[in-house]
Structures are given as structure tokens and as C-alpha cells.
Image (cartoon, rainbow, N blue to C red):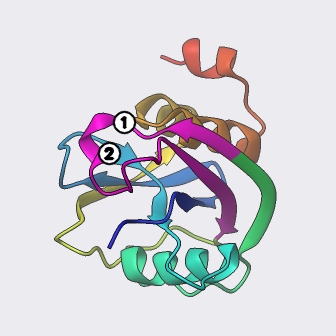
Amino acid sequence: MFKIPKSILVLIHSGDQVLLLERVQPAGFWQSVTGSLEPGEDWRAAALRELGEETGFAGAGLVDTGVSHHFPIVPPWRDRYAPDVGENEEHIFALALAETRTPRLQPREHRAFRWLPAREAAARTGSWTNRLAILDCCGLTLDDVQQSP
């Protein structure tokens, strides 16, 4: 069964801190909560499911930003999709927490987590869509990230 080329990204933040998760594969790839829609699932249901699966956090306060991006599916993940599918649509959600919390990671998917200042998180993430989500949510520009120490 091929994956649906529609996914969500949930940016979790607390004040100026952003939660990033390090994927098991490829090592060193840091990202927010992400995941593909399952058959019959809408954007919000996917965001709530992935949030729970990847962090153990409940979705109270989850906000649909209304932002979506399209991007080509890169070779390491290409074989998960039907042969005629070359692009994914990603929809962005945000979850503001009153304080940072320790997520419950799924060891088969993520190996580590870090709460980072927004500028550092934007610089560290391996995804341009994730970087834009951090910048938008935290009121930063790309210049802020390029000028950070």
C-alpha cells in the first residue's frame, strides 16, 4: 500500500522555544512532528494522531495555520509512494504550550528531542517548510536566522 502524498507538520512551541525531533533515519535530520494522512483521514485528524503518536501530547489548543506547501518527494522516501506520484502537499498546524514538556518518543521513528530557541530551531531543521513554519509562528525572518550566532 502506497502512502498518500498529503502530510501534516505540527510546530510545537512554548514562548521562544521550539520542539524538534531527530529522526532515526537519516541520522542528524531534525524536524517538527510530521506524518502522512491515512485513508479517509482529514488534515486535523492526521495532525492530532501524529501529535499523539510522536510526542504523547494531547491536541488541546492545536491551531490550523491555513498554510500549505507543495514540494517534490526526495529519493530516500520516493519508493513509499505510487510510481506516478512526485509531489507532496504538507499542511501546517501549531501547538502552543504553557511550558516545555518532555515528549514520549517512538524509538522506531525518533532518537532524540530538543527544545531550542526559535532561531536555532529554524537553522537546525532539515526541511525548508519546517523552517518557514518556525519563522512564521515566531515572528522571525530568514535574515534573523542567517544572522544568529
Apparent side of residue 11 relative to residue 127 in the rendered image (left or right): right
Q: Which residue is drawn at 47% across and 37% down?
A: 127
Quarter location, residue 148? top right
Give residue 45's quadrant in the image. Answer: bottom right
Q: Callout 1, which amino acid?
A: Val
Say whether marks 1 and 2 touch (CB < 8 Å): yes
The one of 149 and 33 positioned closer to us in this rendering: 33
Q: Could you tell me which quadrant the N terminus lies in?
A: bottom left
Going 36% across and 36% down the picture, which residue do you hit? 74
Write down the region rendered in magenta: 69-96
Instruction: Quote the CA–CA distance across marks 1 and 2.
Output: 6 Å
- Residue 70's place in the image compared with 148, above or below, is below
- The tag on residue 78 is 2
Query: What percent of the width, then of the height, locates residue 46?
Result: 57, 77
Dot 2, how many residues are within 10 Å of its Cα: few (below 14), some (14-19), or many (20+)? Answer: some
- Residue 140 lies, with reference to residue 94, above or below; the image says above
Whether residue 117 can be seen here: yes
Magenta segment: does it hold 78?
yes
Above or below — where is 47 with respect to 125?
below
Q: Where is residue 62 in the image (x, y as percent from the top left)?
A: 71, 75
Q: Give x and y (percent) for residue 23.
A: 26, 53
Secondary structure under tag 1 reads loop
54 over 17 or under it: above or below = below
Q: Is mark 2 on a helix, strand or loop?
A: helix
Pointer 1 residue: 74
Left or right of 98 in this view: 75: left
Residue in view at x 48 percent, y 16 percent: 149
| Residue drawn where x is 23% and y is 39% of the image | 28
